[in-house]
Image: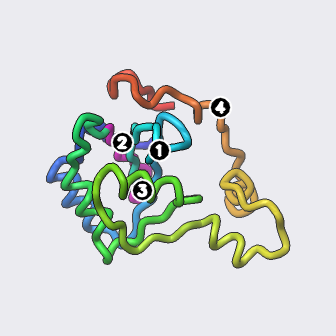
Amino acid sequence: MTKIYKFQDDISTDALKELEKHTSLALDTEGSGLQITQRDNLSLVQFSTGNNDAYIIQPNRKNYKAPNIVKILENEKITKIGHYLRYDVSGLEYFLKCNIRNIFDTKIASKLCRTYSQNHGLKDLVQEFCSKKLDKKLGSSDWNKDLNELTEA
């Protein structure tokens, strides 16, 4: 069972200490649209240590002050792993005014290593390497609603 930690505005100091113990973290964001730095907002930041956990943070969309998240993102000792991070990095750097260090993008890695395929989407990679089908039907959730209204699904 996945342990979900929900935070409003920023992660707690205790959560920061826990995440800083790891050499790599999964990273994902959600926004209110695809033009995150021009028109749309950064709605959610998500980390995972890979140990059946999820740290879900809904940033303060008035000022985007999140110094603990920034400490994680700028920490060169922690590899931030994600798929197609161009969107995530641009949104995080724009809204949180940070400079993300040490990222590993699985889509770029797939294009470099899997030259035998044209399919480099996350769904394809998870199917090939983990033999699991991703259910993307919840991907269009309203990430701006109250954090307590977000379900485990």
* Disc 2 from disc 4: Cα separation: 19 Å
Question: What kind of residue is marked 3?
Answer: Asn
Residue 8 in the magenta stretch? The answer is no
Count of marks overlaid on the render = 4
Mark 1 = which residue? 36
Question: What kind of residue is marked 1?
Answer: Ile
Mark 2 = which residue? 56
Q: Residues within 10 Å of mark 4 (few under 14, many from 20)?
A: few
Tell me the SS state at disc 4: helix
- Above-or-below relation of 70 to 141: below
Question: What kind of residue is marked 4?
Answer: Lys
* Disc 3 from disc 1: Cα separation: 30 Å
Q: Nearer the viewer, residue 106 or 20?
A: 106
- Bounds of the magenta segment: 49-58
* Disc 2 from disc 1: Cα separation: 19 Å
Q: Nearer the viewer, residue 92 or 128?
A: 92
Is residue 18 toward the left or the right of residue 27 in the image? left
Please report contact status of discs 4 and 1: CB closer than 8 Å, yes or no.
no
Query: Looking at the magenta stretch, what is its main secondary structure?
Result: strand
Circle nearer the N terminus (3, 2):
3
User: Which residue sits at x=40%, y=41%?
Assistant: 42
Q: Nearer the viewer, residue 40 or 48?
A: 40
User: Which residue sits at x=16%, y=52%?
Assistant: 14
Question: What kind of residue is marked 2?
Answer: Ile
Circle nearer the N terminus (2, 1):
1
Tell me the SS state at disc 1: loop
Mark 3 = which residue? 51
The mark closer to the camera, 2 or 1, is 1
Circle nearer the N terminus (4, 1):
1
Mark 4 = which residue? 137
Tell me the SS state at disc 3: loop
Q: Nearer the viewer, residue 7 or 140?
A: 140
